[in-house]
């Protein structure tokens, strides 16, 4: 229940300044400074979704996938109705070569977020990696139906996870 309480807290100065500074350092590629800024935020805001999102972004840039999974779990607990915690957790698991876990966790969230194209897109990537191209095609077609098909197709053509489908992408 603490996650719900924290979620309702508004980030105000000076903590807001540290969040903004961390975002700035992250955009500049200085992950160490971004972490320093996050460490200065009041401890009761450690589980705030915005803080957790930033922490995940930093960990991902540093390719600290185990820490990413932990942070994503905390994000899911603090804000289960936000899709990014679910997406981030599965992405990190996939990066750790735990694609079946990534698929299972994200597939469970697909019904909760039926309008988010990135979920079926990532499920297509995981299915393809797991050697299930028919399923991958179905998920990718769903992603096209939810988002900007041209943009998603362009992304898919460059995605190494979808390499086995590359020649077919024009037909999906």
Image (cartoon, grey):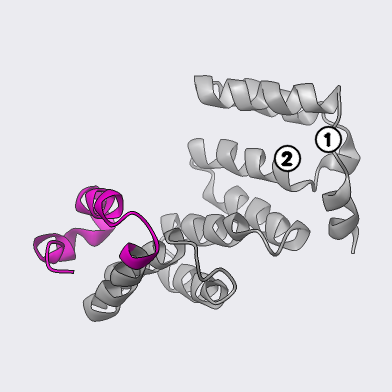
- Residue 97 visible? The answer is yes
Q: Position of residue 46 (x, y in %)?
A: 81, 42
Nearest the eye: 168 or 99: 168
Observer-nearest residue: 47 or 64?
47
Q: CA distance from mark 1 to mark 2?
A: 9 Å
Question: Which quarter of the rendered picture does the C terminus lie within?
Answer: bottom left
Q: Secondary structure at mark 1?
A: loop
**Taken as a whole, is the magenta stretch helix, strand or loop?**
helix
- Please say whether residue 151 is one of the residues in the magenta stretch: yes
Give left or right: position of 9 versus 70: right
Identify whether 48 is placed above or below 72: above
Q: CB of mark 1 within 8 Å of CB of mark 2?
A: yes
Q: Residues within 10 Å of mark 1 (few under 14, many from 20)?
A: some
Q: How many marks?
A: 2
Q: Nearer the viewer, mark 1 or mark 2?
A: 1
In the rendered view, would you say 128 is above or below 162?
Answer: below
Q: Is residue 153 magenta?
A: yes
The residues colored magenta run: 144-172
Residue 131 seen by the camera: no
| Numbered mark located on residue 119 in the image | none
Q: Which residue is mark 1?
A: 11
Task: Classify 138 as above or below 118.
Answer: below
Q: Based on the displayed image, in which of its 4 quarters is residue 149 positioned?
A: bottom left
In the displayed structure, does residue 126 sit left or right of residue 4? left
Residue 43: x and y, percent? 88, 38
Q: Where residue 12 sits in the image (x, y, percent)?
A: 86, 30
What residue does disc 2 label? 51
Quarter that holds the N terminus: bottom right
Q: Residue at x 74, y 30 (%)?
A: 38
Q: Please report the residue visible at 87 percent of the width from the left and 50 percent of the height from the top.
A: 8
Identify the residue at horizontal 39%, vertical 68% (top origin).
123
């Amino acid at each position: 229940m603490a996650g719900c309480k924290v979620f309702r807290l508004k980030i105000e100065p000076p903590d807001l300044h540290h969040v903004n500074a961390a975002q700035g350092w992250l955009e500049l590629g200085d992950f160490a400074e971004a972490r320093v800024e996050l460490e200065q935020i009041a401890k009761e805001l450690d589980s705030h979704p915005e803080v957790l999102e930033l922490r995940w972004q930093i960990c991902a840039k540093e390719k600290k996938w185990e820490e990413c999974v932990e942070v994503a779990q905390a994000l899911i607990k603090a804000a289960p109705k936000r899709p990014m915690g679910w997406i981030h957790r599965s992405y990190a698991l996939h990066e750790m070569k735990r694609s079946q876990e990534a698929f299972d966790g994200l597939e469970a969230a697909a019904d909760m977020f039926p309008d988010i194209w990135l979920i079926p897109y990532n499920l297509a990537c995981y299915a393809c990696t797991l050697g299930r191209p028919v399923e991958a095609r179905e998920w990718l077609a769903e992603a096209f139906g939810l988002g900007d098909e041209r943009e998603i197709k362009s992304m898919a053509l460059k995605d190494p996870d979808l390499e086995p489908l590359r020649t077919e992408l024009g037909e999906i």
